[in-house]
Amino acid sequence: MEIALTNTLTRRKERFEPANPSRVTMYVCGPTVYSYAHIGNARPPVVFDVLFRLLRLTYGEQAVIYARNYTDIDDKIIAAAAKSGEPIDAITRKFERIYEEDTGALGVLPPTLTPRATEHVSDMIALIEQLLAKGAAYKAETGIYFSVAADEDYGKLSGRSQDELKAGARVEGEDDKRHPSDFALWKTTKPGEPSWEASFGAGRPGWHIECSAMIEKELGSPIDIHGGGIDLIFPHHENEIAQSESAHGHALARVWMHNGFLTMDREKMSKSIGNIITPRELLEDWQGETIRWALLSAHYRAPLDWSEDLLRQAQASLDRLYGAVLRLKDVAAAEVDAPSAFVEALADDLNTPAAIAELSALATAANVAKKPAEQARAKGELLAAARLLGVLNEDPEHWFRASFGDEAAEIDRLVAERVAARAAKNYAESDRLRDELAARGVEVMDSASGSTWRRKG
């Protein structure tokens, strides 16, 4: 099967060909762990989780090595520790755990590797030493800086000119760097801040050097795929390319992928603006798969506007799929692969809207299947495709109960009363209870093995 991915670096969709099909490498920039992630931060792990699943299907589960890092030393982390009075590692470990719980609730598989920046400071120091030796970096009083002038094709990822790069490049506390667009590889020790000893002076790493060092140490370069949100193209990924390629003399990654912004009322979601909602808050009212489906409902490169309507649409779509599975609850699913049309949709630059349409068609096939063999195959194909998208992992009866929340117990009572009325041949009462359940948005399904219920489609 051929996979095509849009490469930000070349600005076109290309056939994906890993350097070594037996060792496919992917790195995605993870969170800075100082606070709760907002739902916009959840889009990259969900998007690249689908790609991870697709790559594992194509090359084998053991052949794909996926690393997603934790930035656990950073200005924001230091500020959070100073404000709370807690040790830095207590803050970072707490929010690592929360991030893993929240992404896990959204059906995100654990990456192969989850390196922490603080575990790779020695690798960062070695990389900085290489850059100093090659004249691509220089020492100033406030730290070690990468010299953008030493990199002739700096700006190739973002497509920005040197004039654009200089505009707004001033960073507080970096007044002694040679050019506005030069960026910090190492920050000289300040009182009260974490510090590591290095041949060029004590201090702590800058943000960009962290990912370059972790990629080289954990995966080696060039890697096959480097991913992240569109906001990381500049300066973070641009700077990763500059420092890594200047040090090693070859590409950092073969393919660069970036997901679009998540907006709230058409405005970029941002902690600084305050227009955010966290997965943890959403999970109080919505099931994880509903949130996941909403995040995948638009193409990953397109912007996605977050709203209650989006979540309701996602809930309705999943209810329909779970309804099809519930209808065939007594049918053993056939051991089959996901249909080629579904897989091909994902293989075409992770076209999740097209894949969702194929999944809907599979649910229709499951609903109309009559013969046992047809039902078994339809159910098997639906579940196999859903696994690639990371949904339909719940027991369908539990799914519907959970979606009704506290009202589920009352619905159970009414369904049980209706079953008793039918057994007593009190059909008037049975019909009355069916109508009451319908008014609550509940459809009752009777079969030889008993009565089950679901949300009406």
Image: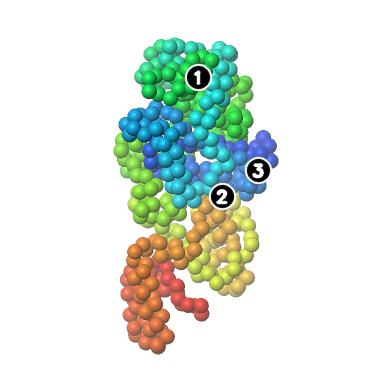
Type of amino acid under label 3: Ala
Q: Position of residue 157 (x, y in %)?
A: 51, 27
* Residue drawn where x is 59% and y is 29% of the image: 216
- Mark seen at residue 197: 1
Q: Position of residue 15 (x, y in %)?
A: 62, 39
* Residue drawn where x is 48% and y is 49% of the image: 104
Q: Residue furthest left?
A: 274
Q: Are marks 1 and 2 in contact (CB under 8 Å)?
A: no
Q: Label 1, label 3: how many angstroms apart (C-alpha)?
A: 37 Å
Q: Would you say residue 262 is visible in this rendering?
A: no
Nearer the N terminus, badge 1 or badge 3?
Answer: 3
Identify the element where label 3 is drawn.
Answer: helix
Residue that badge 3 annotates = 63
Residue that badge 2 annotates = 345
Q: Nearer the viewer, residue 90 or 24?
A: 90
Identify the element where label 1 is drawn.
Answer: loop
Q: Position of residue 79 (x, y in %)?
A: 35, 29
